[in-house]
Amino acid sequence: MNPSDPSSFSHRTEKISTGRKYHFVDQLPLNYSQGTPTLLCVHGFPDCWFGWRYQIKPWVRQGFRVVVPDMLGYGGTDKPADPKEYSTKRLCADLCAILDLLGIQQTVLIGHDWGAYTAGRFALWHPDRLMALIMLSVPYTPPSLEYLPVTTVAKLAPNLSYQAYFEEQRSTKEIESNLNTFLRVIYRGPNPTQRFKISQLYKGPEVLAKIYVPDSDIVLNAQELEFYSKVFQQGMNGPLNYYRTALFRHEEELAAELSPNLRPDLPVLFVWGTKDSTTTSSLIQKAHKFIPRLQDLALEERGHWILVEARDVITEKIPQWLKDLAVEYQGNLKTHL
C-alpha cells in the first residue's frame, strides 16, 4: 500500500443489492476475523477513494479493516445521469449494501466533505449499522421542515454561491472544458497566494479561463494532480449531481419524518481546520444540540483538505479516539475495538 501508487491497494468492483456497480478498496489487516472492526471511509467533492491514500495503510496496520468506495458518479463506480439517483437516502442504501456484501453488520463510518454530510444522514437512516461516526470538515446539519432552494441559500450566504453554479447543468461542460484549472482552484491550501474566491465560479467559464493557480498554492503534488485529472476526465456530471439533489433529499426526509437527533448513545467525532471557510463555530455549536456524544477537534491553521494537509494528525487521532472509546464505553464498542 503505497500512497504514490494507486495500484498497490486491494481493489474490488462488485454489483451490490441496490443494482449498482461500485468500485472500492478493501484492505484487510493480518489476522483478520469477523470481530475485526471496519472503517468505512466516504469521500467528498471532487474526490475519490484516493483521497484516503495516506490513511489506509496505517489504519490497516493498527488492526482495522478499511473499506473505501468510489462514491456514486466517481471513478470506477456507476455514473447515472439522473440527479435523483444521488439522493442521500439512496447513497446510504448503497453503503448498507456494500456492508451487506462484505458481511459487516456494524461499522465505524468516516466521511469528509460531502462524505461527512452523507455520513451524518446515514446515522439517521441506518442508526443500527453504526458503532461510531466521524465527520471531517463539514459539520452535521439536521433535516429541515422547510425546503430552501440552493439559490436561496446562496443569497443568504454569498460564499456558497458556487453551489448554485454547480447546481446548474451548464456547469458540467464548463468545468470539463477547464478541468485542470478547476482542480487547482478546488485543491488550494489554507494560505493561497492568489486570493480567488470559490464563489466567483458562479460567473462562469470566463472566470476559470483567466485563473492562474501556482503549484505552491495547491495541496497536491504533480503526480496526484495528474491522477485526479484522469479520474475526472471520465466526466463531471456525476460529481456535480450531488449539488442537484436538495429537493429530492428534502422530500425523502420529510416523508420519512426523520428525527434531527442522532442516536443518543452514538459516539461522534468532528474534526475540522480552523482555516476552512466551510466550517464556522456557529455550525459546530448547532450540531452539539442534536448529537449528545459529539466531540470536536480543531486543527489550527489547516484548511479544507485535512486528509492531506494534516494527514499525520488524522492518521493518529482517529484510531486513538476509537481506542479510548473501547476503554470508556463498556457496551458495544468494547466488544469490537
Image (cartoon, rainbow, N blue to C red):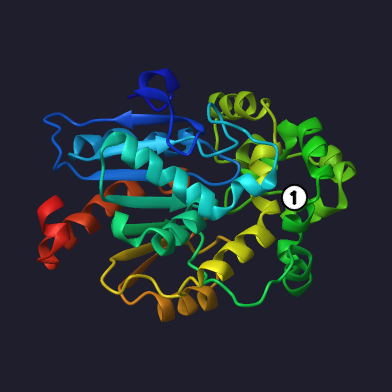
Above or below, 197 against 256 in this view is above
Above or below, 337 against 215 in this view is below
In this rendering, position of residue 149 left or right of residue 34: right
- The outermost residue toward the bottom is 289
Instruction: Look at the numbered disc 1 and give the secondary structure of its residue.
Output: helix
Residue 55: in sight, yes or no?
A: no
Q: Which of the pair 290/62 is nearer the observer?
A: 290
Q: Which of the pair 275/14 is nearer the observer?
A: 14
Residue where numbered disc 1 is placed: 166
Q: Where is residue 70 in the image (x, y as percent from the top left)?
A: 49, 35
Q: Where is residue 329 in the image (x, y as percent from the top left)?
A: 14, 67
Measuring 33% from the left and 77% from the top, which residue is drawn there? 292
Q: Where is residue 310 in the image (x, y as percent from the top left)?
A: 41, 49
In this rendering, position of residue 123 left or right of residue 233: left
Task: Please identify the quadrant where the N terminus is shown.
Answer: top left
- The outermost residue toward the top is 7
Q: Position of residue 281 (x, y in %)?
A: 51, 75
Residue type of the residue flagged with mark 1 = Phe
Above or below, 8 against 118 in this view is above
Measuring 13% from the left and 67% from the top, which residue is drawn there? 328
Residue 147: in sight, yes or no?
A: yes
